[in-house]
Image (cartoon, rainbow, N blue to C red):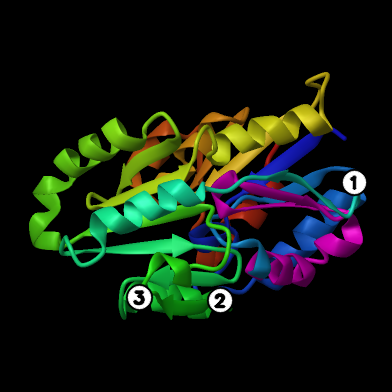
Amino acid sequence: MNKIYFSDLDGTLLKDDHHFSQKTKAVIKQIYEEGNMLIPVTARGMNNLFRLAKDLELDKLGGIICGNNGATVYSFKEEKYLIKKELSRDLIKQIWDRYYNKKKLKVTFNGESEIYGFGPSKQPEFWAKVMGNKYIVANSVEDIKESITHLVIVIKKNDAHKIQEEFDELVELFGDIANLVIYDGRAIEVAVKDVDKGQTVKEIVKILDPESKCVTFGFGDGPNDFSLLKAVDISVAMKQGNEDLKKLSKFVTDENYNDGVANFIANYKK
């Protein structure tokens, strides 16, 4: 194996209709036929990711998939999880007690096949539907049945100026036991300590390439792809993606809806 490709899914490897193009499927098959690997690295839960992986035939090719922003990694070849981490129930309860019916913001708790929220919420419900998951309105912390890999706190647009204050308080409370990050100007993600896309990419590379002989590539479009692109040898941002991410990246490829990842891989010359 000479090359390992790591790619985000939404806005990157997937088209805007949340499907893979035929060109993408063909390029990925060729990657594996040449003895290399492409590994999806996404915020999506494993329940949905297994279905997408089968669409790419990664199950037949003996591939690896990485979900929940790096908290969960599964090997089809070995038929087992290589990495599986989750937030503690104590932290989940503390977040619940801090926000439920007390502050005017939205919190979603993300599990493998279920997403939990305080009430109806258009965007989480939309993404739950896209991912084939179930959105559940939780009335108590006991309603959260699944293991939670990460949760997201979203502040209302007109209160966006308060996000840094809220973030600082959360870091003071949970910084020792969880990773916290601000994105999109008004959202705070709370994830498993020392777990993000980039850290997990490094762990996967250590497993697959302990002698560091492979060239690693990373593809992404959004704020949660910074760590991924920083962790690889060759970073590639999508043309329609985050401006700061494009500045960080070594290359910018075509948009996700124009086969940006497949085009780059097919045309890249060392």
Pick whichever of labels 3 and 2 is earlier in the sequence. Answer: 2
- Residue carrying label 1: 34
Q: Nearer the viewer, mark 3 or mark 2?
A: 3
For the N terminus, the image quarter is top right
Pick whichever of labels 1 and 3 is earlier in the sequence. Answer: 1
Q: Is mark 3 on a helix, strand or loop?
A: loop
Q: Give coordinates of residue 144: x percent, y percent.
A: 48, 67
Q: Is residue 69 magenta?
A: yes
Q: Residue at x 76, y 52 (%)?
A: 74
Identity, as a three-letter code, of the amino acid under mark 1: Glu
Q: Is mark 1 on a helix, strand or loop?
A: loop
For the residues bearing labels 1 and 3, Cβ distance under 8 angstroms: no
Identity, as a three-letter code, of the amino acid under mark 2: Asn
Q: Which of marks 1 and 2 is in front?
A: 2
State the separation of the CA atoms marked 3 and 2.
19 Å
For the C terminus, the image quarter is top right
Q: In this view, does 140 lie above or below 153?
A: below
Q: Give coordinates of residue 154: x percent, y percent.
A: 26, 58
State the separation of the CA atoms marked 1 and 2.
34 Å
State the separation of the CA atoms marked 1 and 3.
51 Å
- Residue carrying label 3: 139
- Residue carrying label 2: 133
Q: Tell me the magenta residue range.
A: 48-76
Q: Residue at x 18, y 39 (%)?
A: 164
Q: Give coordinates of residue 13: x percent, y percent.
A: 60, 59
- In this picture, residue 115 sits left or right of residue 8: left
Q: In the figure, residue 26 lies in which quadrant?
A: bottom right
